[in-house]
Image (tube, coloured by chain):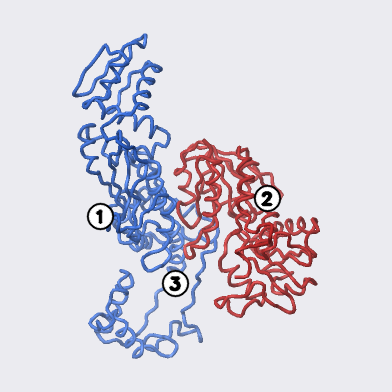
Amino acid sequence: MQALVIVAHGSHLNPDSSAPTHAHADTIRATGAFDEVKTGFWKEEPSLREVLRTVESDEVYVVPLFISEGYFTEQVIPRELRLSGWDVSAWGSDGLSADTATFTAEDTGQTIHYCGPVGTHEAMTDVIVRRAETVTGDPDVGEGFGLAVVGHGTERNENSAKAIEYHADRIRETGRFEEVQALYMDEEPEVDDVTDYFESEDVVVVPLFVADGFHTQEDIPEDMGLTDDYRTGYDIPAEVDGHRIWYAGAVGTEGLMADVVLERAADAGADIDSAIAAVREQTRETDVDGETPAAGD
Amino acid sequence: MTDVGSTPLDVRDEQLDAFCDRLRTNPEPIEFDGLRATASDDGETFAVETPETRTGDLSEAELRGVASEGDVAPYVTNWYYWQEVVGHRGRHRRAFLRHAEAAHEHAVPERYDALESGMETEWGEIVVTATLASAGRRRYEIRHADDTGVEIGELDAHGDPLDAREIATYDHRGRYRPLKTAPSLVSGWVFPDLDGRDAVETLDVFYPASVANWNLEREGDLDVTHWRETAERQTGIYDVIEDLDPDAVEWVAEACCVDSQCLKRREWEYDGGHGLEADGGAGAFPCREPCSLVVAAARKWTKLEEEETHTYEFDLTPSEKEQVEAIVDAVADGRTEDIREADVYEGANRYRARFLRAKRFDEDGNLSGTPTKPDEDGMDGHHGDHGDDH
């Protein structure tokens, strides 16, 4: 018996916060790769303190649906899950390379394979590109397009910027987009000035956030000038300073995120190869003709 | 799943096969819920005993016949359901399902009689009804207690436990429910035909971890974490809550944890040596630790409680003083929506509140024109933080 537990932040105020976590759990559950798939939250229920006791399996893969290594992945989650003997050195990470470490949960006695966050996995690069495909409705998007990967910045966590740059570099190296730029909310180069950083007329903007919320739905659209008031909405694409901005919203809502969760569990030893292949295909919203339900509206 | 032509008291061939196999392959006798069955050492003859029946020296064909007969059949299908269908993996699930038919209190024949008409278990605002289906299989129906007695056809029927997630997300006014055990679960739905696994899964979506914690408590193994320990564990923006005064923790429990606000039964206290006076409630399942909502609210109260009291002078008529109290009561009890528009006899009536504001507030919103912080110009005291980012 092997179980997957996806852990995420959640919210007391906004149900959208946990919606992607539930959606990805549902996708993975449907593959049948795990005997059980559960979700646990810092701000919702079951809490991180109690999620493991809802799991019947003795062997549990825990994947944090967080963007970067930091306070939550290194302190809050291991503490609340009661991982016996946890120390961040177990991951031996440089801030981007946490993969997995195995512990016993003190209260339940289960064997816990505690994985690094989804946001720093190399497969996350594919999700950002997939998000660009989804928002443009073009499975081959790239030619003539710039791509901005947007993060919070270093104010709270220096690893946050590392993750943004890591994926921006990887996408740039593929040569698929004309230009690729990492932008931030609270440091230079700032997302407010997005059009200053691109020559391409069309720019896809993908925020590296787990869920849509205040930052992705209010701050960033207003900061970029897509709208004066987020409540009135904005066009996709929206015209800003002679550019067409294709604003993708939080990357975490992209169906392919389920693949990154599976990759994390597979790296930790879960036997789920066929599920990974299935999820990669099922979560594609654009088809070969470029038809998509997601573009523009 | 339906079994055409099969009644609750029938025994299916596969059940008899499992029964015989078990006796032949395992030298230990079957001893379960009043059923005792053994095989001879050579596996050729069998004996079956129930409180009502005693047989021995049976061939396999005779065993199958006896096991299918009226008195013994319920014991055999009962054994099959609990040992082969439910099994022992998932001890909390098994314990709950046994509880749902009071298996420890009633012998099999009485239980089967009771299950024919349905056995109900209240779980928060939910009622679980266990009934007997074909060949001793159990089925479970889950609905809101407010919908007891309502025809199934008048309720929205669901089959997937995960449907409960959407039902539980919003209250009847469409507001997000961050606390799943708040007594604000909407009614009007039913899960009419769940197996044991899905029944427990459904409950676990409505009231996460409630089954596990209930069973841990029942087994004397519930890991209660008291306020003090929870507060001291916090880091980041919540590390301040350990400074909250014990009196204020009492008010937190009274504000947040009574049955009118949360259906879990509070088992945590201030610490192992100091209880809290506030009513912990009478719910079926326990609350083993201050939840994240309590911790987040306590952070706000910790900051607010740092303020010193200040003597203000307000001019209010006696009725206006009582009206202020009535407004606080109405908000605290969640009654503002229930006060009728023209019911000006209620202090918390909207027109009454608007009249008070028109009369007693100045243009800056200060009661009786009294500034909140007389020494600081321009401070209106109405600022606050609203996020739950961390």
Q: Is residue B308 left or right of residue B129?
A: right
Q: Amino acid at mark 2?
A: His
Q: Amino acid at mark 1?
A: Thr
Residue A267 in view here: yes
**Residue A175 coordinates in the image, percent (x, y):** 81, 58
Task: Single out the mark in the foreground, 3 or 1.
Answer: 1
Q: On what subunit does the disc labeled 1 rest?
A: B
For residue A121, which numbered disc appears in the image?
2
Chain shown in blue:
B
- Drawing shade for chain A: red
**Residue A227 coordinates in the image, percent (x, y):** 62, 78
Q: Pick whichever of labels 3 and 1 is earlier in the sequence.
A: 1
Q: Residue at x 25, y 80 (%)?
A: B346
Helix, strand or loop status at disc 1: loop
Helix, strand or loop status at disc 3: loop
The residue beneath circle 3 is: B307
